[in-house]
Image (cartoon, grey):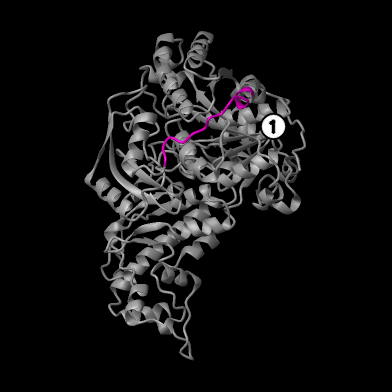
Amino acid sequence: MAIRLRSHKLDHVLPNVPPDIEISQSVEPLSIERVAEEAGILRDELEPFGKTKAKVHLSIRDRLRQVRHGKYIVVTAITPTPLGEGKTTTTVGLSQALGAHLGKRVFTCVRQPSQGPTFGIKGGAAGGGYSQIIPMEDFNLHLTGDIHAITAANNLLAAAIDTRIFHELTTPSDEVLFNRLCPPGKDGSRRFSNVMLRRLRKLGIYETDPNQLTPEQRRRFARLDIDPESVTWRRVVDTNDRLLRQITVGQGPEEKGITRTTGFDIAVASEIMAVLALTSDLHDMRERLGRMVIGTDRAGTPVTADDLGVGGALAVLMKDAIMPNLMQTLEGTPAFVHAGPFANIAHGNSSVVADEIALKLVGPDGYVLTEAGFGADIGFEKFCNIKCRYSGLVPDCAVLVATIRALKMHGGGPKVVAGHPLPPAYREENLDLVERGCANLGKMIENGRRHGIPVVVAINHFADDSAAETDLVRAFALQAGAEDAVVTRHWAQGGAGAVALAEAVMAACDQPNQFRFLYPLEMSIKEKIEIIVREMYGGAGVEYSPEAERKIALYTQCGFAGLPICMAKTHLSLSHDPELKGVPTGFVVPVRDVRASVGAGFLYPLLGAMSTMPGLPTRPAYYEIDLDPETGRVTGLT
């Protein structure tokens, strides 16, 4: 069923743009059933969560399996300021331009935001101004509970790890431990659960009757012998809480002195979030969850979630989360909001299944916009070399978002600090700063072209930008190899302000495409790391800590060297150092550790001082957030 083309253009755009929450609440959303109907989704493929959001079934792909895909567009950016440069706003504005103003079939696919930034510094991630996904309160807070499901599953696995270590250390008898895992019934019979049979097959034991196992087989089955020092799995919470970065567990008197130093990550950094984003169906998700590696035994053999017996339970907790969440933009174009891995500490892209369903729904004449986190050195690189590698999808065009203020910063402008007023240099015309900062834009265009994708630059217009500044950027972008460069005003005008961008994107999608990966998987771990550093960041080399060297050797020995690489690095610089702006050269990237997300399907090196648990500033965003008890409306959300 094709999308039924109906226009829902905004009919009242104020010249003085109100706060995002006021705009969101001023527009009466279409019922989610109507959004679904216009998008070609059948009633029995929809699971509504109230009036304005719903989950959709993966069976849509099967129903439309004969339908050819629409055009696939990835939205990325230059290296941002700490304020962000409006990438989601541009994605939504472009969607509104294509759908509401040009009458094209279109779907927007974005990530679900973490509540950490929502209540911290950055605020929400629904877009802004007259280019938003609505209702923004639902978008930014809870949505349909996917992140809560991830938190529950992640922490169940964390509990299983420490529980197993505890019981093995306090149960010296192999026979007693085996009997507790496989207790006999009144008639003396025993049974293995399905996940236990998985472990037996992994061990090369094919006996299915517990009573027939030899004492040695019972020992091998029952004792995981986890090395506590090797455990990389941490607990998660969807709140920025710096004091949980390092904790000690097991201090209660009943834990018999079995303590361990560990910590918490932000929930969206969980490998389970990455599994959700990269999985293809329930079967694939179950297998990925089961093979997640939590550490090794004392002999150096990887220990998985299935070894702990918890893989099936994790899949049960995640069975509804795999369904994409359907919402809408201010101008009624459909949007999937699904999965939310950070791009600096994970792979930073929304789900494969949402993109696949959207591409079927729009059909061969339609357009699907998917957003990659942060700049073209991070989220875009991972989109190409991780997401597209697993999905098999090929992008037709990349939209590269740039702002005058970010280019001024890269040209040597004063430091930009979130929560502080912008220095005057960013509010006054300064062609010299802009010109020097364009080097960063040029590098990001190069990164897109390095993957064989046509690049269109979107110059996200701010009120203080001069025509001379935007003209300079447009001329530079074209000279640097962009297919086109367009000034956009979608924040202030909605889809009407991005029509020229939409037309440029449609033209670029018709250009020849020679999409290619940055590296073959057959390269060694170090070779893959080093080609990313050279080609994407412009670095001079890589240095590895002793711990990183040990992990690389271990993962190579374990057979993980063929996985793609997911670099965990700052988003505020092409380098590992957030203070190095523009296009730094000659820097050597320090890899302090390498971790394995085997279930998700990648290795992630930690560059420099990357933290997987953000902190809160002195004055977090929650100071402004409140509830009107008379109307029940949320106020102050940004």
On screen, residue 16 versus residue 156, left or right, reads right
Q: Which residue is most to the left?
A: 546
Query: Which is more toward the observer, 443 or 569?
Result: 443
**Looking at the image, which residue is at 32% across and 58% down?**
231
Task: Decide which of 412, 385 is in the foreground and name it.
Answer: 385
In screen coordinates, is 300 left or right of 105?
left
The x and y percentages for residue 202 are 41, 67
Q: Is residue 512 magenta?
A: yes
Viewer-side residue, 367 vs 522: 522
Residue 448 visible within the image: yes
**Is 499 placed above or below 268 here?**
above
Residue that appears at 31% across and 41% down: 526
Above or below for 382 versus 180: above
Residue, disc 1: 331
Look at 40% across and 9% down and name the residue there: 432
Q: Callout 1: helix, strand or loop?
A: loop
Rendering coords of residue 248 (x, y %) = 29, 58
Q: What quarter of the picture does the N terminus occupy?
A: top right
Check disc 1 and give the amino acid type.
Glu
Segment tinted magenta in the rendering: 507-520
The crowd level at tag 1 (other Cα within 10 Å; few <14, some 14-19, many 20+) is many
